[in-house]
Amino acid sequence: MTRLLGVALGILTAIGGFLDIGDIVTNAVVGARFGLSLAWVVVLGVIGICLFAQMSGRVAAVSGRATFEIIRERLGARVALANLVASFLVTLLTLTAEVGGIALALQLASAVEPRLWMPVAAFAVWLVIWRTGFKPMENVTGLLGLCLVVFAVALVQLGPDWSALIRDAVTPSVPAAEHPATYWFYAVALFGAAMTPYEVFFFSSGAVEERWTTKDIAQSRADVLVGFPLGGILSVAIAGCAAVVLLPAGIEVTSLSHVALPVATAGGLLAVAVLLVGLVAATFGAALETALSSGYMVAQYLGWSWGKFRRPAQAARFHLTVIVAIVVGLGVLMTGVDPIKVTEYSVVFSAVALPLTYLPILVVSNDPQYMGDKVNGPVVNALGQVFLVVVVAASLAAIPLLLLTGAGS
Amino acid sequence: MTARRRPRRQPADAGYPPDESVGGRLVDARAHLLDRQVHDVDGVPVTAVDDLELVEGRAGAAPTVAALLSGSILNTRLLGGHQPEPRWGRIPWSSVAKVGVVIELSVRGEDLDVTWTERWLREHLIGRIPGGQHDPE
Amino acid sequence: MNRPHATAVACAVLATLLLAGCATHEGGTPGFLGRALEGAASAAETGALAADLAGADRAPAALLDSALGDAIADARTAAGEVATRQVTDPDDAAAQQASLAAIEEALAALVDARAWASGAHDGAAAPVSERLRQAADRLTGLAEEVGGP
């Protein structure tokens, strides 16, 4: 019975932890402009993240080492450094977006200006990293993040024309009013939002934090293969709610309040209350993960002691890196930049950085020196290689599309 | 005489006499030493190996590894240039207990020069923040 | 860096600059005005939706205030963009004037809606959201006229 509960907890936490501010905002923006005609990108992104999260978790469970340690050993200091710089900058940008997201969500709940919430949010993120254990941290934010299921409930309550929605999703096409370049720009953005680079490093470092062994691979497989797709369904539900309520009215999504309005339309005060809990939990959880990931990356490359399983004084440089990352993120936000804009840029640059972060995982998970006999099977490798092509294509297309479409306007 | 050479530029056998058969394992310095993580005797990570200090053998004998180097020396390896000797972060080869997937030392990390930033930060910053010395939950 | 490397990087930079140049939006001033008008229409429609939700008591006050506040900010941005646009053509100037007037009207309606939602004056939701929807329709109609085919 306890085992079943453990499995269920893992899966529920994976669902609740799947969405971050990038997913929430990008899906809403896309839904309000393109309906469900970009839903296929979410499917693609979910398959990708399942594949690579599984690989990186297996690497950590089998080898007992976290990703960046292995990347440097296997690919050399120079390649690993390029990887580190790109991943770190993108993760820092994402962290900034997440802290901004926490502030925006709190504004929706309190009508207090986001700028006043930002220092509070940043401090709270640091405090939780400083004092809370890894597992409780993940479980609480994951389970509370499950409140975002309200999007799926809201979509059903809105009573949309399901056949039209499904048709839109299954036979995608560029809407008449939109330029194909804009369509593909948002496809890349949505892909970057789904396949967040930091997730891979967080997953593998988390596996080391929790001392996974080969026995834990099965559990992690269940979490990923069941949890992430269900999380992906919530992504599509967000787009669906925006498509049903905002698209017909010609409302563009420019703030987090736009994301909440369809839920209010569908389910009233109770739904909004649940939504706000979910939004704060999801963004807070993602802020924790990105802050820790920045620390993990740098510490693992340079060989420092790291991890929440150590007393902070025993991992001083790691914790300093985390603090610096949070402070820099807060600094950027306090300049008055729009957190929604930061989010939109963070998902595009995530897409750009994807090849650098995913290729090493593919290489390492095939290396018998680290994996023994648990290297990738042929199916996983085939899928991995297909995805590598997709990921490289998205990465190369991202900046040109960004420039061509002026960030999607 | 101490000469620090970069293993990378050395051709495979630059005219050295063949190894005399001695007991022990043959490791490739570039593959098994460079860029490896170094753990101390308690398994706590110390640093990563950024470079190696090689000492010229006497009268035609092969060079030997005098120390593992770490720290800002990495910049010179990646970008080129030289760094004055006093600034090299050294872990003497005599402290190395085992060369495996990670390099294990026979001494505590605390006693090494290379961990001074960690100790400094612990004393002056991280250790001073309330809760810094607490065991994790 | 060796020669081939440097050439490749130079090409990439050049291509990027060219693309950035192409990114200036199509349509010149009419296209620009059309986009600003659509942004303002979106803000007005958001206000109307928020007013309806307020009337039906389906959203908490904090959310509505945030939504209306954000809509006001969007409308102000649109007004600012239109106002600071440099026009040299008499047709463009006329379009600019008409656009500005329509956006300001929507802005006034939004500000009033926010005041109403905060309880500054009584009344049902219907007139408030109706006023906003009419402003939005005017803006969309103008966008089609101004923005061209």
Image (spheres, rainbow, N blue to C red):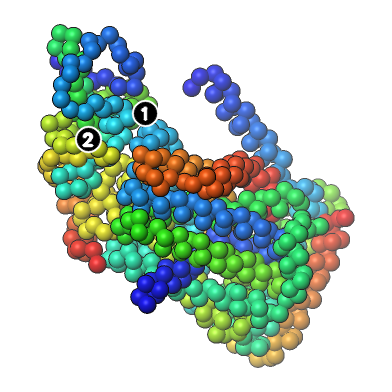
Q: Quadrant of residue B100?
A: top left
**Image point (16%, 39%), residue name:** B105
Secondary element at image label 2: strand
Q: Which residue is at the front of the view, C68 or A266?
A: A266
Residue A202 in the image: state x and y as whole percent: 40, 55
Q: Which residue is at the front of the view, A314 or A165?
A: A165
Q: Is residue B30 above or below residue B46?
A: above
- Mark 2 crowd level (few <14, some 14–19, many ≥20, 10 Å Cα): some
Tell me the tag on residue B99. Answer: 2
Residue that numbered label 1 is attached to: B78
**Image point (20%, 47%), residue name:** B43
Specify the farthest residue to the front.
A373
What chain does badge 1 belong to?
B
Residue A271 in the image: state x and y as whole percent: 56, 81
Residue A94 in the image: state x and y as whole percent: 48, 55
Mark 2–mark 1 Cα distance, whole angstroms, equals 24 Å
- Mark 1 crowd level (few <14, some 14–19, many ≥20, 10 Å Cα): few
Q: Quadrant of residue B131?
A: bottom left
Q: Is residue B129 above or below residue B48?
A: below
Quadrant of image for the N terminus of chain A: bottom left
Residue A215 shows in the view: yes
Secondary element at image label 1: helix
Confirm whether circles 2 and 1 share one chain. yes
